[in-house]
Amino acid sequence: MSIGRAMLACSGAGGALAGLATAAIVRAPMGGLTAGGAAAGAFIGLLAGTAAAAPAAAVIGRGVERLRRSLLDGEGEDGPPDKLTRRLVGPLMGAIGEFRERTRAETRRATAGLRELEVRWRVSESERKRIESTLDSLRDAVIVTDNFDEMTMANEAAAALLGFDRGACERRPVGDLISDATLVRLIHQTRESGSLSGRKTVEYDLGGAPGGQPRSFDITMACLADHSGEGVGGVVTILRDVTREKEISQMKSDFVSQVSHELRTPLASINAYVEMLVDGEAKDESSRTEFYQIIKNEADRLGRLIDNMLNISRIEAGIIQVERTEVDFVEVAREVVEVMQPQARLKNITLLVRGGPSVYTAQACRDMMHQVILNLVSNAVKYTPEGGRVTVAVENDDASRSTLVTVSDTGLGIPPDALPNMFQKFYRIENYKRVAKGTGLGLNLVKHIVETVHGGQVGVQSTVGMGSKFWFTIPFEAGGRLAA
Amino acid sequence: MTQRRALVVDDEAHITHVVTLKLRNAGFEVLTAGDGEEAYEIACAHLPDIIVTDLQMPYMSGLELCEKLRQNPATADIPAILVTARGHALSQADLARTSIREVMSKPFSPREVLAKVHRLLGIEAPEAREGEAA
């Protein structure tokens, strides 16, 4: 460019100026141009000092103009140059032409290099976006830090969990972004360890949302290799929320413990009374009969418990066979009342079935419906004092297109805080445990049969001292998870 | 020899009944309770020589009962046998705060209960040795 500007100045000036300008070009470090240029410069300088300077200057001026056009406008071939011009400017033009070609080649190479860099940058950028999208699709929080413990990458889960702005986190120290000092220290320690081979997993509770419960995390940390592949270039930290897994594990453990307790209790009675009989501790026939009866009752209790648990497990696993027929609920309720009559009579409790003149039927498994109504009526009789009343009412609920069965009693009623737990496995109201025996599984089985198997609903309303009302609905048409 | 007094505590009436019978047949005077609170009142009022209690009961568990008895100078030295249907073991730290000297799992043998009662009270009884041998 400096050459172009020099030539422009030259075209509008006198011969001396042209000589100076040419000498300036010659002094430029241009390899092959120097030898020819030196000769031309010396010659021009000579001409400038003679009387023939004026015509020579005109010739040079024309030559320079051709040169200018050739360089700037690409008009190189406008007729053959005259002899003097060829002699005076030819070498210069040749050198400049060569320079121009070289410059063009350099420019082409630089442009190609630039394009390649652009392509590489785009590939790298798209690779980065792909990694970011992949990381964002993870539920685990992922953060990547460099050798200075500065954030280089973080996914959305990490930003949401640790509460930093993802858009403004890059190249900022993790200590500024993450308030949990222990986590920051763990990242720092992992990097300091300098081990590329191992990974470290720790279990750690993080505060969670403000005011919320702390959540448990499995934190896995591994060092990333630097560009040499030998040193540590940063740390990748993955936080997996294991709160729910821990809760489920605790629930399973509690369930096993509860089942163990429920099974061992009747077994303990059976074992103890058998031993007493063997040891001759029952002194008379009446005591022996009492012991036999207790053993029989406890064995029955154990059998019921196992049946209930198996039925619930089968329903939960979805492996129960369901045979649906058109079930007449009034008929089933009457059968249940007949079964329960002896127990009700012992406490002088009246059992009633109420059903209107319409036909109350729905597609359901008849045996299961018998079990559901039996469990509800049996509970009602257990927790209703002497002289009370238990009523089974069957009606159509047109709004939900279901058959509605309600079992009401005049019993003890259920405290409000216990109501939400009534259908949970093994839930029993502490204060009522001595009123009657139970497995704590009867109502849970009712809920499973009605809701899971038949797609219906169960519920309870109760007031302490005023009795309880348990109800369930079965849709007219077959429904439920196990409908197929 | 004066008659020894035992307190049997369980919310399962059948269990209370069978342990009571075993101890009565062995010459003990037996008091019974259906939960921890009732048991604490009876223990304070009648100061039994030994307590046999269930772990899981309404109102107050067997563990809480024995912790409370340990804290009361009048009942602190009454040894207790804990019978549990829970699968898990109790920690030594929990037991150290209580008057519990022995832990038994359900199902249990009434013979073993009697043997442990005899041992804790330092009573030489042929039944106890037979029970242990069995």
Image (spheres, coloured by chain):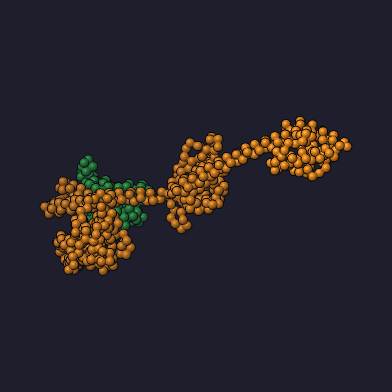
Horizontal arrangement in the rendering, residue A142 relative to residue B21 (left or right): right
**Colour applied to chain A:** orange
The x and y percentages for residue A105 are: 64, 36
Residue that protrudes farthest toward the front in the picture: A79
**Colour applied to chain B:** green
Q: Residue at x 19, y 59 (%)?
A: A326
Horizontal arrangement in the rendering, residue A431 relative to residue A152 (left or right): left
Q: Residue at x 74, y 40 (%)?
A: A66
The x and y percentages for residue A392 are: 20, 65
Horizontal arrangement in the rendering, residue A306 relative to residue A226 (left or right): left
Quarter of the figure that contains the N terminus of chain A? top right
Q: Residue at x 51, y 45 (%)?
A: A126
Q: Quadrant of residue A353?
A: bottom left
A162 or B75, which is in the foreground? A162
The x and y percentages for residue A448 are: 27, 55
Q: Residue at x 54, y 40 (%)?
A: A233
